[in-house]
Amino acid sequence: MFLIGFPLLVIPLAIYNMIAFLTPGVRWDSPLTSIHLVSQANWTMTLGDIFILFSLIVLFVEVIKATQATSRSVVDHGLSMLVFIAALIEFLTVPQAATSTFVMLVMLCLFDVVAGFSVTIKTARRDFTVDKVEA
């Protein structure tokens, strides 16, 4: 799989930055569409909601990638950490990133780092225990 060494959450960060900088005044909380539910309620979706949903799907793929124990996974985790640090710095220093949508994206980057290291450690511990029992 060629995407092993590439932190996929860079994609939502890049898309966010393209939207925020190329379309000044974009409102992440403005309604895009509304769906009428069986309960007679209306569910209103905003640009930020749809963007976070997309980012959650990307995070799911990242967690699946973390389950593969390869030598590239260490590089992938390191790059994910750099993406998180860059996103955090951007949130603190760039006015266009001062939105709730971006904060949630930063948190997804943090979850990616924590989940990646946790899954890798758990997998390595399990592999070490299995190898020890077989020896």
Image: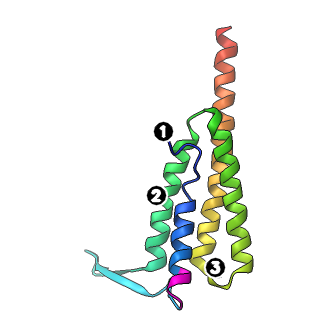
Residue density around tag 1, few if under 14, some if 14–19, many if 20 or more, within 10 Å: few
Helix, strand or loop for disc 3: helix
The range drawn in magenta is: 20-24
Q: Whole-percent x and y of residue 28?
A: 50, 83
Instruction: Return the residue at label 1.
Output: 1
Residue 117 versus residue 89 in the image, above or below = above
Instruction: Return the residue at label 3.
Output: 97
Q: Which residue lies furthest to the bottom in this view?
A: 25
Residue 70 magenta-drawn? no
Distance between mark 1 and mark 3 Cα atoms: 32 Å
Counting residues from the N terminus, which is met first, the one under dot 1 or under dot 3? 1
Residue visible at 54% across and 43% down in the picture: 65
The image quadrant of residue 30 is: bottom left
Counting residues from the N terminus, which is met first, the one under dot 2 or under dot 3? 2
Distance between mark 2 and mark 3 Cα atoms: 21 Å
Helix, strand or loop for disc 1: loop
